[in-house]
Image (cartoon, helix red, strand yellow):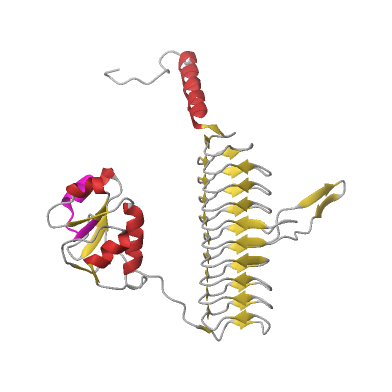
Amino acid sequence: MSAGTGDPRFFRRSGPHPLAAVAAACGAPPPDATLLLHGVAPLQTATAGQVSFLDNRRYLPALAATRAGAVIVHPDLAGRVPDGSIALATAEPYAGWARVAALFHPEPPATPGIHPAALVDPAAQVDASAEIGPFAVIGAAAEIGPRCRIGAGAVIGPGVVLGADCRIGAHASLSHALLGARVHVYPGARIGQEGFGFASTAAGFVSVPQLGRVILEDDVEIGANSTVDRGSAQDTVIGAGSRLDNLVQIGHNVRLGRCCVIVAQAGISGSTVVEDFVMVAGQAGLTGHLRIGARARIGAQAGVMADVPAAAEVVGSPAMPVRAFFRQVAALRRLAERRAPPGQGEVRTESG
């Protein structure tokens, strides 16, 4: 059963909003027309009371057929918006869509108070505006800032500090960590646990005490079931605005810069430094003690075993520059075709 975009059973809704307010939210010039909009929807299903968007030319046929009351588009495509729909032209349509969707579906505010089933140490400091969910545990000397939301069953360890407007998902756990403002830790994430550090001896392994912390700067997001180990002697740092997808592993002493993106199932080994605006695609693995330069891009399933220069794009395992990788792939294909037995070489079409 489909209830359309933003099922009210799950998503708080606001509005309706006048067209002028929607245009302001997405960064479009004030329109001449007047219209009251009630929500957001994809091009294919939007009605006259809804706003939609186009950010990919592949969907131009859907734009031509849409019945949306307004469509957020790039200025170059404003003329393609059909009669009956109003073009809201902005240089960044997808960012505009994000802001408009948040206008109609704002994040629910914290409901101040501590649930009777929560366990809060008397030595903890919990701001009166914070929300502490059922079965949450707040340790001694922990500090919970204004308007924070702590989900059901989450554990905030002793001494952990949360800045204003943090959201901690259900069953997440935080220890040895200092969080800035507006940090979002999704359900099941583990922040600040002991890192993977040990010394090898003839008799076996000797665990090395992990004496650092985790620092999550302002506006960081940690995806569901991701793990961020605390430092061994230094701190593990996730820079302001960085986003970790679900199922990401960050080793001890790793330092991420500002606005990095780490996609699902990627892992970064200990003491690696990742500079600002780096993107690491899904299932990529980075060995320890590396430096990844600012704005570098690491391809999916890449195995990075050496430093990566700033703005470089690498793929493969071992990782190498994109052009070099595909040259090698092409060379191997040609070699395989030359050595293939008769009838098992390159597959040809009837016209080839």
Q: Quadrant of residue 309?
A: top right
Image quadrant in which the N terminus is located:
bottom left
Classify residue 96 as left or right of residue 125.
left
- Residue drawn at 55 percent across, 44 percent down: 294
**In this figure, what is the number of numbered marks?**
0
The magenta stretch spans residue 67: yes
- Report the residue that reaches farthest toward the left: 83
Image quadrant in which the C terminus is located:
top left
- Residue drawn at 60 percent across, 53 percent down: 249
Nearest the viewer among 267 and 110 is: 110
Q: Decide: is 35 above or below 336.
A: below
Q: Decide: is 5 above or below 343.
A: below
Q: Is residue 2 visible?
A: no
- Residue drawn at 51 percent across, 24 percent down: 328
What residue span does the magenta drawing correspond to? 60-71
Nearest the viewer among 25 and 183 is: 25
> Residue 61, position in %: x, y?
20, 46
